[in-house]
Image (cartoon, rainbow, N blue to C red):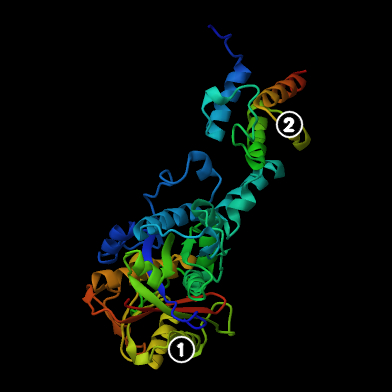
Amino acid sequence: VSQPPPDPLEARLVELAVAHLDIAPNRLRPDALLGEDLGVDSLAALELGMVLEDEFGIELPDDVLADVLTYGDLVAAVRSRVRTAQA
Amino acid sequence: VRGAVEGRRVAITGVGVVAPCGIGAESFWAGLLAEPAPLQQRRVDDFDPAPWFSPKQARHTDRFTHLAVAAAEEALADSGRPEVDPVRGGVSLGTGIGGVGTLETQVGVLAERGARRVSPFTIPMVMPNAGAAELSMRTGWRGPCETITTACAAGTHSIAAGARLVASGQCDAVLAGGAESSMTPTTLAGFTRMTALSSSGVSRPFGAGRDGFCISEGAAVLVLEELGAARARGARVYAEIAGGASTADAHHITAPAPAGRGAAECMRTALDDADVAPDEVAHVNAHGTSTPLNDAAEAAAVAAVLGSPAVTSIKGVTGHSLGASGAVEAVGVALSYLHGQLPPTAGTAELDPDLAAIDLVLGGPRAWEPGVALSNSFGFGGHNGTLVFRPA
């Protein structure tokens, strides 16, 4: 089964998540819960948010991060913020 | 130990140490018997937290905690890992300044990049109790888990407190010690500005021309258990902790009380706690920082209180690791029992003739028939600590 190639934003996100969360890339599925499935506690999520802000030149306010439950939510939040920043 | 439940005695069953002269008890001991290079700042250069921390865990904990975990894991392995009811296992880990390295980094982040870039891990990395907390999480021990911060007396006070937890019957096993890694630009400048550091880079305890201490980092942890239980499970017992004391000078924030009054009072109190007579003391592992005032006060106190014990300060080799130093020196004492030898006061050629006459171990290791030993620590703030050891 051939997978569609990930877009550059998502590819970079995977790299950063792997580096900062000690997580194998194949665990970063859209429905993976950050806490339960990936072992990311609230402080680590805040730290990752900080890294993503720097990397993508965006702002991820704490109330936005608070709504991020899954890895898919995180990708969506970053994508939406990047679009807003570029608009 | 005063307040001990009848029959309960405190055994040292495991030791672990990370110091500039050696990582692990074996290389540490070899380091104590070797000639140290002159160096004002003595770091544990080849320390890597990787055996105990994933990269993520390592980023989220300060170096003082890394050193503490390495020492504790060695001590536990050395002890043969006592099986403990988790609520009767304790941690008593002191530090002088805790995670000040992390604080200094984050102060820089705040200044350069603003508050939103300060790490959310700042507080749990900086807090002085972070090392103790990490040890409780790793062992699963849920009894008392506390941190004493009495500057350079913290390691000794923490071991005394841990011994009391065992003696009183509150705990069956305790990880007790100290950890320090605080050689940041700001703390180094602060110590330099108060002219506490040696400008020659030679740590010369009790020697003429001593010019301050050589600052260092490190950690040391003892496994303390009830003596009878330790013997019953066949554990190796290095020595018994027979007592200890904690007193205050109530005099000055940094200078010791005149004529070693505080040190003398502390040693007397410790001997009383251990029910040991002054002339029974065969060995003193001194605080011996190589500062003019400390060593004069401590020599005066030893001469006034005790008979003629063999005195050594291992700070000629280790330098002064502040809140870890008392624990590092307690490991030195435990290993002196093991090897039947007292390490020399490296860096010192002869006793400063202006000091009270004490029998300083000089030149090379001295054989000894293990007897009662004291270990002293004195901290800024006028905090005094003494531990009393006895062959088990």
- Tell me the chain of label 2: A
| Label of residue A59 in the image | 2
What subunit carries mark 1? Answer: B
B130 and A50: which is toward the camera? B130
Q: Tell me if mark 1 has few (under 14), some (14-19) or many (20+) residues whose alpha carbon lies within 10 angstroms of its own.
A: some
Which marked residue is nearer to the observer: mark 2 or mark 1?
1
Number of numbered tags placed on the structure image: 2
Say which residue appears at 65% left-offset and 45% top-offset. Answer: B120
Tell me how far mark 2 sits from mark 1, CA to CA.
63 Å
Q: Are marks 2 and 1 on the same chain?
A: no
Give amino acid for label 1.
Asp
Q: Residue at x 56, y 45 (%)?
A: B60
**Residue B202 showing in the rendered view:** no
Viewer can see residue B188: yes
**Residue B378, image x and y in percent?**
48, 77
Residue placed most toward the observer, B151 or B10: B10
- Determine whether the residue tagged by mark 2 lies in a helix, strand or loop: loop
Mark 2: amino acid = Glu
Q: Give the label on residue B272, or none.
A: 1
Above or below, comparing residue B275 to residue B191 in the picture? below
Name the residue at 46% across, 84% down: B270
